[in-house]
Image (spheres, coloured by chain):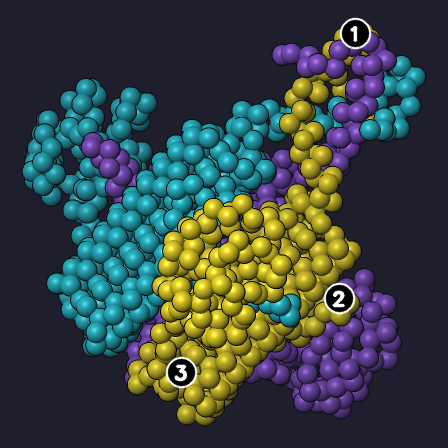
Chain colours: A cyan, B yellow, C purple
């Protein structure tokens, strides 16, 4: 593809030689003369200067040093669009694969694609242009919004509601019953039927092998939380995450891999939880908070919190604790020396 | 449903107006005039007094304030039964779905339900009334007890034995080979064949995407542990848990989400392991122990232990350590001040 | 089986009575007179002396005390071979099960076995003798090397390349898109298409429900890392592990259960990461390093490192910190006592 053609396809202004021929994309460091690279800001000036790429996506005002480029206010996002042009997705055949099993009363929108061996339960509603890959089980009563995509091996339990343009990755389990039991009068532990289905908002993504549990009508809720486990709009959830019954994840929040939320956690909007972070149950994590990797929140966090550690403390305090911990063996010796000097017994000073 | 009908259906004594019409259930805080709520003890007195629920499940002796109620010695458990009445489960069709693949020599009990595209291997034995959902693979030689239920996407490996009334959630993998290798004489690492199948006791539950590994005959065992990985009776295991080869989980224990047990861990009876807790291999966790969230047990715990932290320490000590840690940066400064006062060099005092 | 027959089958030298009849295998402690046990070294002398096993696999030079044995320089590995003899694997039928769905242009090698309801996408290449179990989805363009085995419920995404003799356990998801987004000019978060497929080297193993993500062409890479997520040769990965986009795992490394690697982590050769260990993104872990259970590496580790803790510190320092932490509450009291003695205010000494 010539750079000028790419400029037209992406509707971006071209500067310099539009006849450069491109056959792929790469990072600044790796790109060769037939590849497109991108620059998002001033800190890449040196890498840009030494890059061998044939053409660039550059932010406005970034000096192009005479090289051919497309101007973009969001160069990484336009690079993403360019990837789609160079690596078009293999189209999934429209219609229902003959090996799929679709309940007679399931409702299928226009141009849906139901893959081999997929199973669509009674009363399910599959929106227009939804793509269901092989080996997906859609339990009875599930609703899937338009243009959503559900990858192979994902399991959507009874009544789950999936928004528009949602991406569900392989092996994700949405709406299995929450982990809630109670004792009968004879002491035997019985399951609370978790009959309140999970809801996932538009434009959200659920990672591979992630689990999001259903809740039940007697489920305790707090503040603005719904009884239903609810994932907001534009939420991005990575692989291997566990979201327990009755949790609520605010719009545009991000949960990285292997995060675990205990029941009724309320995560605000634009929250970022790094890998393996966790929350105790019935905790509220305020909007725009940042929960670091492996951090464990055990109590409510005000909006804009930044925490680390288990149990989590304010980020800067955590840094100081970690630094001080390394000096802890030394500190013990220093205190012993002082005690010696003062003639104080090193035995415990009692409460 | 009228309250009087519900009283009859649940066989619970009615007090007050039995003509109240109910159309659902909710928590004390959320319930409206057509909903049933429940109270488990005295601490809910205020919430009960201000509840708008139309009827209640109340423990004996709890003052009903003139409101219609059913008396229950286990109100939460009876609430669970009421959920079943208001939200009857869609019946799964009995018999074998035409798209299922059942080995000719598999044995199917009475009234089993085998879902679409399920695969039942050679010599498998499926007890009466077992429900197998779509996309379950039952490998050869598996035995499933009466009234068990296996949800879509679960995988039961060769020879696994599942007890009666067991619930296996979606995507769980039972009996994949344990993570055991050894070096050949030429240094190449080879797999030990893990041919000892997993056993799961009656009334246990396995969470979505949980993995429980098979063991092998040379597997080291300790104390009363079996060579086989064995889950006891009434054990409740949440989502995303990993149980390695040769572990034994005692009856009625609880493993919350994302717990990880290394090989040959012996978990006693009525043990509770909170989310993301872990155990090193060959460790015994005594009966009735409580292992806190994210705690890591590295050595044997006597019965009734309560531990937290990684590595785990006694719960109260952990609380004191956490409190002291926050004062660690301050402590460093205080010791430095003392040293100054005494004219002692702050350099490390040596060993 | 007579011991002499076993000696012949394993091509190992027999010492003592070859007529001993064996019907199984067990550990030294558990084995009875009709069972074979094994000894790997001198530390098992006492257990050997008291073992009731009928025959043994013994290393050269280990005193057999008059008991029948086979001599083996790698007794555990030969025990593994013996397991295979006593527990022959049920053969999977060769050929394509009638319920499998194989794209017309997929290429199948000699003697492949494609299980019930497996789905093989367009252009896939399945090497000779590969065994694909039921409910596996092979997306278009996947390549699987000779003698590999893929267990039920595993999902292989577009273009993934699997080496020879690789074992993929149940529910593993290879090649789902990495967790990479960027903001458009209007602030909306969009996905970067992760079009660079995962590669897995020969003789590697992937655990049940493990996830390994694909990367994209603009993905930052460091040092010798490839843009592609790449698992080396002979790598053993346990259950529930998460490997993010752009990671590289060196040959013969071991990742235990629930390990999590953030994007672009470079793990060297012969590295061992224990259970639940983690790495921040763009970190290099040197060859032969040992990362302890639950440890979190936040910066590069030189070859041969041994670390523990979160954030990870050198192993011995971690031990000293853990020991000192338990004395932290006591230390606070001792410092307070010293301050009292000196007449110093216990208030914070300031920065």
Residue C149 or residue A257, whichever sits in front? A257
- Measured as percent of width and height from the top left, residue B213 is found at 57, 67
Q: Is residue A36 left or right of A240 when viewed as pictured?
A: left
Q: Is residue C321 left or right of C201 when viewed as pictured?
A: right
Q: Chain of mark 3?
A: B
Indicate the quadrant containing the N terminus of chain C: top left, top right, bottom left or bottom right.
bottom right
In the displayed structure, C342 sits above or below C112; it is: above
SS at mark 3 in the image: strand
Q: Earlier in the sequence, mark 1 or mark 3?
A: 3
Q: At 33% across and 54% down in the image, what residue appears?
A: A199
Residue B113 — which label? 3
**Image quadrant in which you'd find residue A49:** top left
Q: Is residue B259 left or right of C49 when viewed as pictured?
A: left
The crowding category of the residue bearing disc 2, from other C-alpha atoms within 10 Å (few below 14, some 14 to 19, many at least 20), is some
Q: Earlier in the sequence, mark 3 or mark 2?
A: 3
Q: Whole-Å distance between the Cαs marked 1 and 2?
A: 56 Å
Q: Which residue is mark 2?
A: B222
**Image quadrant in which you'd find residue A154:** bottom left
The crowding category of the residue bearing disc 3, from other C-alpha atoms within 10 Å (few below 14, some 14 to 19, many at least 20), is many
Q: At 68% across and 72% down in the image, what residue appears?
A: B227
Q: Which residue is mark 1?
A: B341
Q: Whole-Å distance between the Cαs marked 3 and 2?
A: 40 Å
- Measured as percent of width and height from the top left, residue B112 is found at 43, 85
Q: At 75% across and 66% down in the image, what residue appears?
A: B222
Q: Earlier in the sequence, mark 1 or mark 2?
A: 2
């Amino acid at each position: 593809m010539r750079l000028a053609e790419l400029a037209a396809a992406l509707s971006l202004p071209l500067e310099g030689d539009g006849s450069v021929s491109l056959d792929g994309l790469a990072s600044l460091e790796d790109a060769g003369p037939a590849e497109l690279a991108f620059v998002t800001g001033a800190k890449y000036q040196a890498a840009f200067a030494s890059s061998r790429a044939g053409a660039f996506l550059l932010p406005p005002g970034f000096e192009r040093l005479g090289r051919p480029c497309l101007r973009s206010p969001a160069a990484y996002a336009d690079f993403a669009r360019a990837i789609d042009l160079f690596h078009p997705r293999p189209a999934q055949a429209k219609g229902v694969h003959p090996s799929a099993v679709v309940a007679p009363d399931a409702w299928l929108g226009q141009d849906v694609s139901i893959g081999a061996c997929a199973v669509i339960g009674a009363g399910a509603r599959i929106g227009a242009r939804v793509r269901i890959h092989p080996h997906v089980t859609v339990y009875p009563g599930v609703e899937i919004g338009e243009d959503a995509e559900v990858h192979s091996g994902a399991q959507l339990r009874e009544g789950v509601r999936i928004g528009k343009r949602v991406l569900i990755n392989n092996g994700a389990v949405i709406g299995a019953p929450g982990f809630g039991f109670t004792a009968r009068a004879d002491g035997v532990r019985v399951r609370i039927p978790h009959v309140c289905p999970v809801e996932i908002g538009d434009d959200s993504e659920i990672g591979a092998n992630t689990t999001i549990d259903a809740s039940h009508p007697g489920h305790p809720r707090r503040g603005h939380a719904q009884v239903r486990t609810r994932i907001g709009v534009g939420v991005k959830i990575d692989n291997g995450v566990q979201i327990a019954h009755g949790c609520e994840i605010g719009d545009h929040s991000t949960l990285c891999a292997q995060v675990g939320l205990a029941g009724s956690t309320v995560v605000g909007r634009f929250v970022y939880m790094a890998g393996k972070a966790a929350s105790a149950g019935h905790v509220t994590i305020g909007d725009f908070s940042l929960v670091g990797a492996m951090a464990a929140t055990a109590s409510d966090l005000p909006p804009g919190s930044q925490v680390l550690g288990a149990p989590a403390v304010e980020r800067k305090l955590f840094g100081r604790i970690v630094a001080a911990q390394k000096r802890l063996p030394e500190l013990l010796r220093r205190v012993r020396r002082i005690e010696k000097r003062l003639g104080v017994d090193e035995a415990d000073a009692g409460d």
